[in-house]
Image: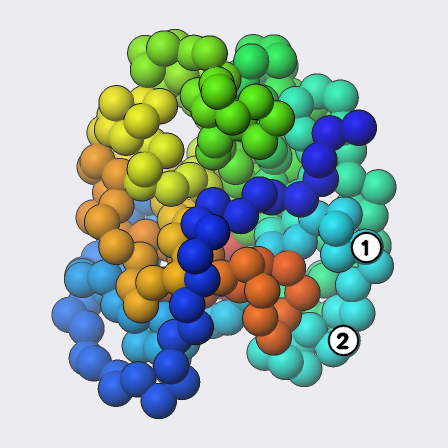
């Protein structure tokens, strides 16, 4: 059975000191897929952003049945739930996690773990949408997300045996099918290192896709993949007060709700 936990992308972890001095960040407007967000103009530290930004997390079957009222009480405003992997795996806890989050008053979305060496981008997107990756403009559903990172099953082929051009084409095909079926482009979850290594730091997707950057053990989100000036979500640690990985949204709660609605 395929591993159903997002692998740790950065092995060295350093906690951000809770007393880190807060800094005022310049603000700019960013439009992604028709949604305008006010985001930090410069990379902010986890402490900086956490002072006012919505706190969230992401989970998979590794977290099993999540205590959602407890997560809500600890400050969770959003969560991404793993739905599928390739075209052969579905998270058996998806219903409890996805629906449970909504019942607790947490904005939730679904993500797909990509295995580009197994099947086409379009077929994996269709499988994802059919098994939890759909979207509706109800203000409680985040756009579908594509988790694209180093191959956890074959470290010698971290880019899944695809050339840079083929990888970009695979991601575009996945995105096109998700957009065709749901009306939203997927959020792209990745690391800057993977994006540089496996897509050649391609910048063609940045203008139409929100970025969910993964960078652990650092005081800020660091340099971003080509074309992205801002991150929308930042996964800054793989453990913390909330179940699963720890995330921040780069904006306010009202902007998060606007992002979820799609306008």
Could you say where residue 251 lies in the image, as x and y percent from the top left? Answer: 36, 66
Left or right placement of residue 165 versus residue 101 in this view: left
Please tell me whether residue 224 is drawn above or below residue 162 in the rendered image.
below
Q: Nearer the viewer, mark 2 or mark 1?
A: 1
| Residue at horizontal 67 percent and vertical 82 percent from the top | 73
Q: Secondary structure at mark 1?
A: loop
Please tell me whether residue 18 is drawn above or below residue 83 in the rendered image.
below
Residue tagged 2: 69
Query: Can residue 254 be seen at all in this image of the molecule?
Result: no
Left or right placement of residue 200 versus residue 245 in this view: left
| Residue at horizontal 71 percent and vertical 35 percent from the top | 3
Please tell me whether residue 161 is drawn above or below residue 98 in the rendered image.
above
Left or right placement of residue 257 versus residue 33 in this view: right
Q: Quadrant of residue 209?
A: top left
Farthest residue in the left direction? 26
Compare residues 87 and 99 and report the one nearer the observer.
Answer: 87
| Residue at horizontal 21 percent and vertical 36 percent from the top | 226
Query: Can residue 223 be seen at all in this image of the molecule?
Result: yes
Could you say where residue 105 lies in the image, as x and y percent from the top left? Answer: 68, 70
Q: CA distance from mark 2 to mark 1?
A: 15 Å
Count neighbours of disc 1 (C-alpha within 10 A) and say few if under 14, some if 14 to 19, many if 20 or more. some
Residue tagged 1: 64
Q: Which sits earlier in the primary sequence, circle 2 or circle 1?
A: 1
Could you say where residue 156 lies in the image, as x and y percent from the top left? Answer: 48, 20
């Amino acid at each position: 059975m395929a591993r159903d936990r997002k692998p740790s992308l950065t092995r060295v972890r350093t906690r951000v000191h809770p007393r880190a001095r807060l800094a005022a960040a310049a603000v700019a407007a960013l439009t992604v897929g028709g949604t305008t967000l006010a985001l930090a103009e410069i990379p902010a530290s986890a402490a900086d952003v956490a002072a006012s930004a919505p706190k969230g997390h992401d989970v998979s079957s590794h977290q099993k049945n999540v205590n959602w009222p407890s997560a809500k009480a600890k400050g969770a405003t959003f969560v991404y739930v793993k739905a599928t992997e390739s075209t052969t795996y579905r998270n058996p806890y998806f219903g409890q996690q996805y629906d449970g989050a909504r019942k607790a008053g947490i904005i939730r979305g679904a993500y797909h773990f990509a295995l580009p060496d197994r099947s086409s981008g379009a077929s994996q997107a269709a499988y994802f949408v059919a098994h939890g990756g759909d979207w509706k403009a109800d203000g409680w559903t985040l756009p579908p997300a594509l988790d694209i990172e180093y191959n956890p099953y074959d470290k010698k082929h971290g880019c899944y045996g695809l050339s840079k051009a083929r990888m970009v084409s695979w991601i575009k095909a996945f995105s096109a099918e998700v957009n065709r079926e749901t009306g939203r482009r997927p959020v792209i979850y990745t690391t800057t290192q993977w994006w540089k290594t496996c897509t050649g730091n391609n910048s063609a997707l940045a203008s139409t896709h929100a970025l969910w950057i993964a960078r652990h053990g650092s005081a800020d989100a660091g340099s971003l993949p080509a074309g992205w000036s801002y991150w929308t979500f930042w996964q800054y640690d793989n453990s913390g007060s909330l179940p699963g990985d720890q995330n921040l949204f780069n904006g306010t709660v009202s902007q998060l709700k606007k992002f979820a609605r799609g306008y």
